Amino acid sequence: MQNRKVIVYIAASLDGYIAKPNDDLSFLSIVEKQGEDYGYHQFTENIDTIIQGRKTYEWVMKQVPEYPHFHKQTYIITRTKRESIGNVHFYTDDIKALIANIKSQAGKDIFVDGGAEIVHLLLQNKLIDEIILSIIPVLLGEGLRLFQDNIGEQTLQLVDSKHFDTGLVQVHYRLIKTD
């Protein structure tokens, strides 16, 4: 069986914000370029499960008529029980148990698709295997920080780095497990 990895794939400003105040993502347009997806399509070919926070899920659903990952098993981490909608499951139990259960099954990698609270929770519990971070060439100065306090020290190993003519730099790290 393949060793399934929990991978955060996300974009942030150079100063570490994933959104401006009021969930404003307009700064991402700085690096929009026709025909360039910064490896996103290739990345999603290697995943079959999504982990996402409720706030991020609700933000996405306000933007689109249909959930973009509807064909993949998706777990929305929430405190409020709700019925599943197709492959979208609203999960209220222990995050460690969820990750262990998913990893115990055959399948592809697991995509952590935001938001900051879920990334924080997974880092606190040392459940993230890799981080692919696209750094947008802008300093926002305020907003929603990707990495919050109290995650404990965690060592990373560089897997790859790429730069693009838009100024975007993408770094891919593997978290070194010390437990």
Image (tube, helix red, strand yellow):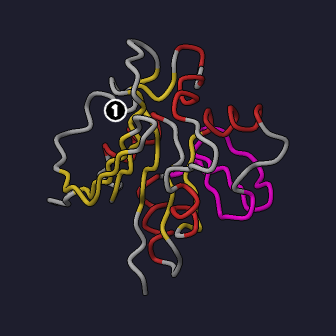
The vertical placement of 173 against 119, above or below, is below
Of residues 99 and 173, the one nearer the viewer is: 173
Quarter assignment of residue 33 = top right
How many discs mark residues in the rendered view? 1
The residue lying furthest to the bottom in this view is 1
Q: Relative to 122, say whether 12 is above or below.
A: above
Q: Residue furthest right?
A: 65
The reply to whether the magenta stretch includes residue 17 is: no
Q: At 76% from the left edge and 33% from the top edge, which residue is drawn? A: 63
Image point (38%, 36%), residue name: 135
> In which quadrant will I find the C terminus?
bottom left
Which residue bears the numbered disc 1?
A: 147
Q: Is residue 62 left or right of residue 115?
A: right
Residue 45 point in image, percent of width and height: 57, 68
Above or below, 44 against 66 in this view is: below
Secondary structure, mark 1, is loop
Stretch in magenta: 70-93
Q: Is residue 70 left or right of residue 178?
A: right
Give the image location of residue 24, x and y in percent: 59, 20
Q: Position of residue 6 (x, y in %)?
A: 42, 60
Q: Position of residue 132 (x, y in %)?
A: 38, 50
Side of 81 where 142 appears, left or right: left
Badge 1 local density, few (<14 within 10 Å), some, or many (20+)?
A: some
Residue 80 on the magenta span: yes
Query: Between 157 and 168, which is closer to the camera in this rendering?
Result: 168
Q: Residue at x 51, y 81 (%)?
A: 106
Q: Main secondary structure of the magenta part?
A: loop
- Please, which residue is most extreme toward the front here? 165
Q: Residue at x 73, y 64 (%)?
A: 71
Q: As shown in the figure, which amino acid type bears the numbered disc 1? A: Phe
Quadrant including the N terminus: bottom left
